Structures are given as structure tokens and as C-alpha cells.
Image (cartoon, rainbow, N blue to C red):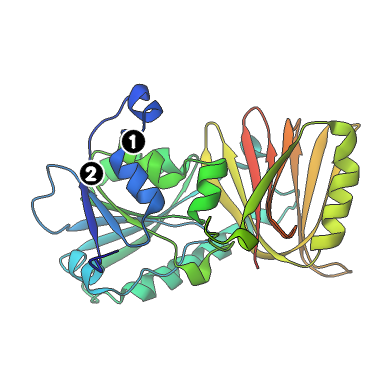
């Protein structure tokens, strides 16, 4: 930051569980905190990449048009845009028959948006690859299969939420990659929630964890009344599948807890006949976490389970 750098370059090395416990994952730590692109290079990175893989999901933003990224991709001959769709039967996705169609249409739009931002020459082969399963696992498997030189992956939300609730896709990729990785921080103007600095007391945050099921219906009802209509993004994090963005840009309708079935219902979309709406069920929740600003404004709602979590982030 002091030097106005446009790119941070680190090495890639294997780290065991003890390194993670004691904070020795340098590349992953920088990737979580940096606000400029970071290139984690392997020893095989002896020239500009010819085969590039760009991981995309429903919430992916355009690639920044900076001189450093333009130069880095200047010799690319093949670019794969890879999306791993959640396995519906495993993540208990939306109870909506048209979910697959809506998801595929959203990914097609994302592909065009990200591809156009690169503005690569016509001679460069650009392909959308649709896979199903864990994003990190599928991306790494395809990268090995296609002899990829560089994986490009973006951070999906601000570092504040990553530290609270998740290690994030870049960390999963960095821990297992055999090729170089370019991590793109999410532009602040696109962030799902604001970046809150500790130096601003009026914007400090608090996290509340509620494990008493008896409180859930009342708390969720009050939360729904206060936040109905706010634009949200929904991400599902599964122990096997990893983190998957499942919806972005939908109005929040509400959340409710069903005692009989022991599940939390998350409802997104517009009210009224003929309006599109989505419902996601989180079975057998363990806790509900609320991340709020000091003034009570809700930033994130997290439903934790034994298998992972459902995370709703609210726009401001």
C-alpha cells in the first residue's frame, strides 16, 4: 500500500495442519487481507501462462482491467471459465423445479460478463466449463486434467465475513494447488457488505450466536420484519462440496424456523402471484449467528449445521 503496488507475488508451498494452526500460511493470509491482486507462483512459473482457468460463480465480478493483469494474461492461448454447480441432492437446494434452469442462465450471464471484461484477442480460445460438485475440488481436478498454468479466483465477500465464518475458496485452492494462482480481491463498490474498520467506533460490529431453539421463531420473525426487501446474496458451504454461491441480487423475504421438521426456511424474491421467489431449507440447524453493526443494522445471517452453513449477506 505504501508503494502503490499493483501486484503482490508470493510463493506456493505445502502446509500441514500445524502450519495452519500457527498461522504460517503466508499466501493464504495475504490473499485474505490484500486489496490488490496477489499471484502465488509455483517453481514451474518460468514464463507467462498459456493456459488459464478462471473460476466463476453467480456472484463473480468482471476481471479488473489493470496493466499488471493485462500483461499477465497477454500470452494466453486458452482460457477456461469453470463453474462447479452445487449438487442439489447434497445441499438441499431451492425447492423450485426451475432451479437448474435459473442457475444455468445465471452462469451463462456471468460467463459473458467476465469474458467481455478480459477483452482478449479473437484468436484466444475461450470456453465455459460446467461441472458439478465441490468448487475447490472440481477446479483443481480440471486444472490438472487440462495442464493449466494459472488459476484465477476471486474473493466472494469482504475479509470481515471471511474471518468470521469461512476460510474462503482462495484458501482451499492455495492449500492444494499444483499450479500458480492469481487471487483477485473483490472491488469495494461490489462488496455485499461494507468493509468496517476497527478505528471507526460508530461502525464497529458485533456477532450474536443463538443456540436456544425456543428463541429462533421470535428472533427470525423480528429480523424478517426489519430487513424485508433488502438485496441479499446466499452462499451454501458444505463439508464435502465447499462454498457455493446459490443466489445473488434477490430481495430478502424472510426467515422462519419449523419446530416440527427442525429446519430453517430462507425465502428470497418478490411477494405476490406470478412473482419469482426461492426457498432454501436448512435442516437440523445447530445455531443462528447474526453479524450486525453497532447501530443494529444486519450485515449477515448464518445458519450453522453439522455439515456446514448457509450464509445470507445483506447489501447496504
Residue 109 in sight? no
Q: CA distance from mark 1 to mark 2?
A: 11 Å
Q: At x 76% / y 30%, what residue is drawn?
A: 284
Q: Percent position (x, y) of residue 95?
A: 76, 48
Compared across the picture, whether 169 is left or right of 286 comes to left
Dot 2 alpha-carbon crowd within 10 angstroms: few under 14, some 14 to 19, many 20 or more: many
User: Mark 2 sits on what residue?
Assistant: 179
Helix or strand or loop: what does disc 1 sit on?
helix
Foreground: 254 or 9? 9
Q: Percent position (x, y) of residue 47?
A: 9, 56
Helix or strand or loop: what does disc 2 sit on?
loop
Q: At x 48% / y 52%, what residue is drawn?
A: 159
Residue 2: which quarter of the image? Answer: bottom left
User: Mark 1 sits on what residue?
Assistant: 175
Looking at the image, residue 262 lies above or below residue 123: above
Residue 21 in sight? yes
Foreground: 82 or 313? 313
Q: Quadrant of the C terminus?
A: bottom right
Compared across the picture, whether 199 is left or right of 263 comes to left
Q: Which mark is residue 48?
A: none
Q: Percent position (x, y) of residue 310?
A: 66, 43
Q: At x 58% / y 62%, what residue is drawn?
A: 192
Foreground: 83 or 306? 306
Q: Nearer the viewer, mark 1 or mark 2?
A: 1
Q: At x 52% / y 69%, what residue is drawn?
A: 190
Q: Quadrant of the N terminus?
A: bottom left
Amino acid at each position: 500500500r505504501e508503494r502503490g503496488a499493483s501486484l503482490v507475488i508470493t510463493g506456493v508451498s505445502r502446509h500441514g495442519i500445524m502450519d495452519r494452526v500457527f498461522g504460517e500460511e503466508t499466501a493464504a493470509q495475504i490473499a485474505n487481507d490484500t486489496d490488490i491482486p496477489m499471484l502465488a507462483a509455483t517453481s514451474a512459473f518460468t514464463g507467462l501462462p498459456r493456459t488459464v482457468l478462471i473460476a466463476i460463480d453467480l456472484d463473480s465480478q468482471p476481471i479488473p482491467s489493470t496493466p499488471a493483469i493485462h500483461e499477465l494474461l497477454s500470452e494466453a492461448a486458452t482460457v477456461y471459465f469453470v463453474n462447479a454447480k452445487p449438487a442439489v441432492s447434497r445441499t438441499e437446494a431451492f425447492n423450485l423445479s426451475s432451479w437448474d434452469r435459473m442457475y444455468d442462465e445465471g452462469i451463462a450471464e456471468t460467463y459473458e460478463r467476465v469474458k467481455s471484461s478480459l477483452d482478449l484477442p479473437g484468436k484466444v480460445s475461450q470456453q465455459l466449463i460446467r461441472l458439478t460438485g465441490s468448487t475447490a475440488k472440481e477446479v483443481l481436478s480440471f486444472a490438472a486434467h487440462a495442464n493449466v498454468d494459472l488459476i484465477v479466483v476471486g474473493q466472494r465477500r469482504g475479509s470481515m465475513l471471511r474471518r468470521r465464518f469461512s476460510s474462503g475458496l482462495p484458501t482451499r485452492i492455495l492449500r492444494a494447488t499444483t499450479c500458480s494462482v492469481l487471487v483477485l480481491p473483490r472491488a469495494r463498490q461490489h462488496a455485499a457488505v461494507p468493509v468496517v474498520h476497527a478505528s471507526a467506533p460508530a461502525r464497529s460490529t458485533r456477532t450474536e450466536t443463538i443456540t436456544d431453539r425456543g428463541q429462533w421463531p421470535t428472533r427470525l420473525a423480528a429480523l424478517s420484519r426489519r430487513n424485508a426487501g433488502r438485496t441479499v446474496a446466499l452462499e451454501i458451504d458444505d463439508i464435502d462440496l465447499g462454498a457455493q454461491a446459490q443466489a445473488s441480487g434477490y430481495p430478502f423475504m424472510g426467515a422462519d424456523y419449523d419446530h416440527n421438521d427442525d429446519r430453517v426456511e430462507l425465502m428470497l424474491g418478490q411477494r405476490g402471484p406470478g412473482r419469482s421467489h426461492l426457498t432454501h431449507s436448512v435442516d437440523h440447524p445447530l445455531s443462528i449467528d447474526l453479524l450486525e453493526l453497532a447501530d443494529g443494522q444486519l450485515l449477515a445471517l448464518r445458519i450453522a449445521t453439522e455439515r456446514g452453513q448457509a450464509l445470507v449477506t445483506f447489501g447496504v
